[in-house]
Image: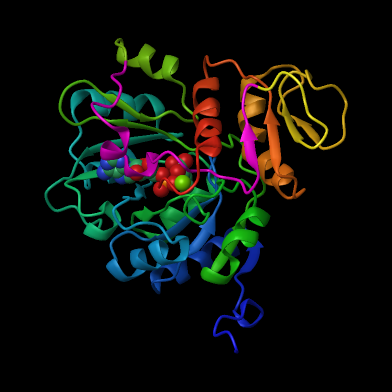
């Protein structure tokens, strides 16, 4: 029987350089309701006009993302964010300290906000972020409107940090890929909710808890109740490579690929070291790239060396725990 689905016959997205001409072309596609992958300082995002229900629907379809999982609206400045969300004194304080940069703030929706309900999954709150990456900011300014942008991977897969990662995962489902090189931080933004009560950490990420708590002058609250209710993207099985992960591995078995930290596995075949010098920023920047690379070896299991939990280690260990979680739970 002839299959209706024939990947070879599907159109593939072009990859173009993220220079001024590339950004202008991407902005034109977004104006026309299209979806474009673009680099940020954290991971590659998949952008659509956040004010258009139809454009946002294409993001959910391309990623096969559950429509109850809201998207981050990316804007160019705090002023632009204030048109979409209601900022408490604490939220403003955080925005002034960390924007532009890898921090996402979830705040109550402002009356008159233009970000459409589909982008917010119908919630009365909105996630806002001002990225610092020049291409990301350039694209937002050229588009002249908020951009809804989740990470540019199929739902549940490892986030992309290169244009090639995006192409492998999503090429047949999107309109264009802007290639701006590897993302410098390599981990998604930290998500903080400033709703009722004290600011809550919904997702550890590229901005560390210590830095945020130092600015707030108080400890961040954790999520009240199950995290999935607060940040639906935080379902357990996420960031999953095809291979199984064995965490906290002190030694490597011969059948395994190895994700090392600080050289404990020794110089072996199929091993990549996140940071030989035990530098957590270097490890964060390498994490998704190395997971993609080791997964492509086609081995059944990846052993992961222990990684300290302070600083960026909190977010690194969070992503590893999700990547190791049993499949099919989300
Ligand atoms: O670094 C990043 O944040 C990247 C780049 C592209 O900016 N984006 C990203 O988007 O990681 P995404 O969709 O993969 O993750 C967004 C997270 C999800 O966990 C989602 O549930 C949460 O933010 N989120 C969005 N809106 C929310 C809201 N109103 N309330 C609670 N959580 C929200
Ligand atoms: Mg994601």
Q: Which residues are magenta?
A: 220-248
Quarter of the image that includes the N terminus: bottom right
Q: Is residue 71 left or right of residue 186?
A: left
Q: Quadrant of residue 146?
A: bottom left
Res 175 seen here: no
Q: Position of residue 132 (x, y in %)?
A: 49, 39
Q: Is residue 328 magenta?
A: no
Q: Residue at x 36, y 59 (%)?
A: 144
x, y (%) of residue 167?
63, 61
Query: Which residue lies most toward the left here?
Result: 111
Horizontal side of residue 171 vs 88, given as left or right: right
Above or below 155: residue 174? below
In terms of image quadrants, where is residue 324? top right
Task: Please provide percent x and percent y for residue 6.
Answer: 61, 81
Q: Residue furthest bottom?
A: 1
Which residue is drawn at the image coordinates 60% and 89% (left, top)? Answer: 2
Q: Would you say the magenta stretch is mainly helix, strand or loop?
A: loop
């Amino acid at each position: 029987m002839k299959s209706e689905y024939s990947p070879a016959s599907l159109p593939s997205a072009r990859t173009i350089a993220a220079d001024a001409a590339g950004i202008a072309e991407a902005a034109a596609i977004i104006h026309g309701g299209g979806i474009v992958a673009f680099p940020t300082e954290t991971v590659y995002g998949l952008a659509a006009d956040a004010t258009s229900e139809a454009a946002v629907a294409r993001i959910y379809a391309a990623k096969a993302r559950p429509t109850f999982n809201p998207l981050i609206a990316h804007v160019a400045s705090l002023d632009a964010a204030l048109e979409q969300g209601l900022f408490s004194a604490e939220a403003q304080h955080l925005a002034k300290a960390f924007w532009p940069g890898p921090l996402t703030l979830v705040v109550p929706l402002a009356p008159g906000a233009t970000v459409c309900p589909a982008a917010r999954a119908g919630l009365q709150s909105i996630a806002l972020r001002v990225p610092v990456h020049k291409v990301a900011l350039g694209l937002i300014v050229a588009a002249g409107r908020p951009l809804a942008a989740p990470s540019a991977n199929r739902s549940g897969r490892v986030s992309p940090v290169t244009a090639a990662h995006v192409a492998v995962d999503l090429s047949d489902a999107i309109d264009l890929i802007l290639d701006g090189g590897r993302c410098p931080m390599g981990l998604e933004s930290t998500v903080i909710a400033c709703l009722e009560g004290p600011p809550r950490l919904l997702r550890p990420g590229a901005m560390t808890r210590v830095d945020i708590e130092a600015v707030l002058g108080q400890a961040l609250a954790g999520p009240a109740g199950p995290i999935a209710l607060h940040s639906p993207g935080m379902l357990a099985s996420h960031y999953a490579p095809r291979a199984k992960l064995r965490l906290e591995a002190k030694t490597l078995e011969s059948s395994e690929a190895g994700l090392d930290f600080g050289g404990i596995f020794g110089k072996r075949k199929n091993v990549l070291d996140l940071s030989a010098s035990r530098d957590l920023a270097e490890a964060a920047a390498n994490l998704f790239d190395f997971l993609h690379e080791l997964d492509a070896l086609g081995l059944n299991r990846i052993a992961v060396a222990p990684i300290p939990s302070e600083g960026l280690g909190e977010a690194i260990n969070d992503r590893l725990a999700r990547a190791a979680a049993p499949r099919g739970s989300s």
